[in-house]
Image (spheres, rainbow, N blue to C red):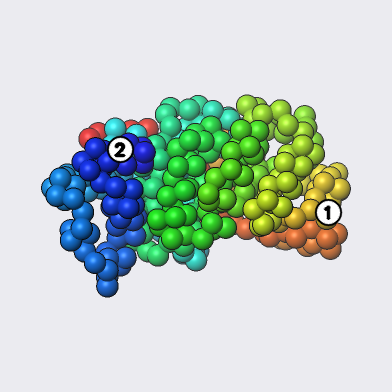
Amino acid sequence: MQLSGIRARLAALGALPLHQERVLRDWVQGAAHERGRRPASDFLPKPVREALPLLDAELAGMTRLVSAHPAEDGSERLLVALNDGQMVESVLLPRDGVCVSSQVGCAVGCRFCMTGREGLLRQVTSGEIVAQVVLARSRRSVKKVVFMGMGEPAHNLDNVLEAIELLGIEANIAHKNLVFSTVGDLRAFERLGQGRVKPALALSLHTTRLELRSELLPRAPRLTPEELVDHGERYARLCGYPIQYQWTLLEGVNDTPEELDGIVALLRGKYAILNMIPYNSVPDLPYRRPSWERARAIAAGLHAHGILTKLRDSAGQDVDGGCGQLRARAGRTIAL
Ligand code: SF4
C-alpha cells in the first residue's frame, strides 16, 4: 500500500486533506496522540468513519512481527513479514531510534553484505516503510528513523521520500532525525533538496580509492569519492546538518595508512562526521572485522588530524547483526 493510495481512498470517501492527515497521524502516532484531542469520530465524514475499521485492519496487516532478537547493547533486531510473505529486517536502536528496510534485497551487491548477495526482489512500499516505524513504536519510543536497513533507498526514491515526508510532518519526528542513507546517486542528490522535509544524509564511502570502491560496491553509480563529497557538501549546506560518511572497517582492506591519509585529504574542513563501523563478519564472506583496539586507534588518529570521527558498533552485532542475516537464516519468505 502506498501512502498516496491511502490518501486517494480516503479522498474518494469524501475526506478533505485535513481528514486524511488526521487518519494518517492517528496511525503513526497511536493512542498517545489521541489523548486530550477531539476524537476523530466527531468530525470525520460518515463514509470515512464507516470505512475506518477495515482501513485500520489493512494498515495493521502491512507488517507482522515474525521474531525479535534483543542484544546486549539495548538494540533489538526484528524480523518482519510483509503481507505477501516477503520478509525484511528492522532494528530498534538504543536511544529511541529505528533502522528500517526500504527494499526486499538490494541491487547494489556490496561484496561484504548478505542482503546484496540475493539481488533486488521487490520494492518496499511507502506504507510498508511507515508500518515498520509503527511496529517499532508499539515496542518502544521512536524519535529517530534511519534508512540503513535492507536495500538502497535511492533505488526506491518515490516510496522513501513519501515515507520521509509523512514521518517528518505527521509522525512528529525532527527532520534531522530522519537519516537517508545512500551509496551516492545523482537522482537522490537532486530530489532530497526539493522536499518539504529535508532529511539528514548518510553517504556510504568505505574507501577513498575509486578502483576499490568499484570492487566493493560493484553496482553503485560511478562517482568518484571527490564527486560524492562535493554533492554531500552542497546538501549539507542546504539542509544545515553535517553529512554522515559511513565507513565499514574491513581488516586489511580499508584500514591501511594510505586510506587514512586519503580520508584526511578528502574530508578535512568539510561539514561532515565520519562514522566508522567495524565490520560484522558474515559466514562465507572473506572480510574480517579488525579488533576494537585497532579501530579505536584509527579513529583517534583521524581525530588528531581534524576529522570528526565516531566509532560505532553495528547495533545488535551479538545476534548475527549483519544486515540480512536474520532473513537469510529464517528463509526468504514466510507462509501466510
Ligand atoms: Fe545494498 Fe546496503 Fe547491502 Fe550495499 S550494504 S548491498 S547498498 S543493502
Q: Position of residue 171 (x, y in %)?
A: 40, 57
**Is residue 18 found left or right of 256 in the rendered image?**
left
Q: Amino acid at mark 1?
A: Arg
- Residues under labels 2 and 1: Cα distance? 48 Å
**What residue is at 32 percent from the left and 65 percent from the top?**
33
Expressed as whole percent of the image width and height from the top left, the position of residue 241 reads 66, 57
Residue at position x 63%, y 26% in the image: 219
Mark 2 secondary-structure assignment: helix
* Most foreground residue, 202 or 299: 202
Residue 99 percent location from the top left of the image? 48, 51
Q: Quadrant of the N terminus?
A: top left
Q: Which residue is mark 2?
A: 8
Q: Amino acid at mark 2?
A: Ala
Q: Is mark 2 within 8 Å of ligand 1?
A: no
Is residue 224 visible to us here? yes
In this rendering, the label closer to the viewer, 2 or 1: 2
- Precedes in sequence: disc 2 or disc 1: 2
Quadrant location of the C terminus? top left
Q: Residue 82: which quarter of the image?
A: top left
Q: Position of residue 139 (x, y in %)?
A: 34, 61
Examine the rendering and report whether any part of residue 69 can be seen.
no
Q: Is residue 77 toward the left or the right of residue 13 in the image?
A: right
| CB atoms of marks 2 and 1 within 8 Å | no
| Residue furthest to the bottom | 36
Residue with the mark numbered 1: 268
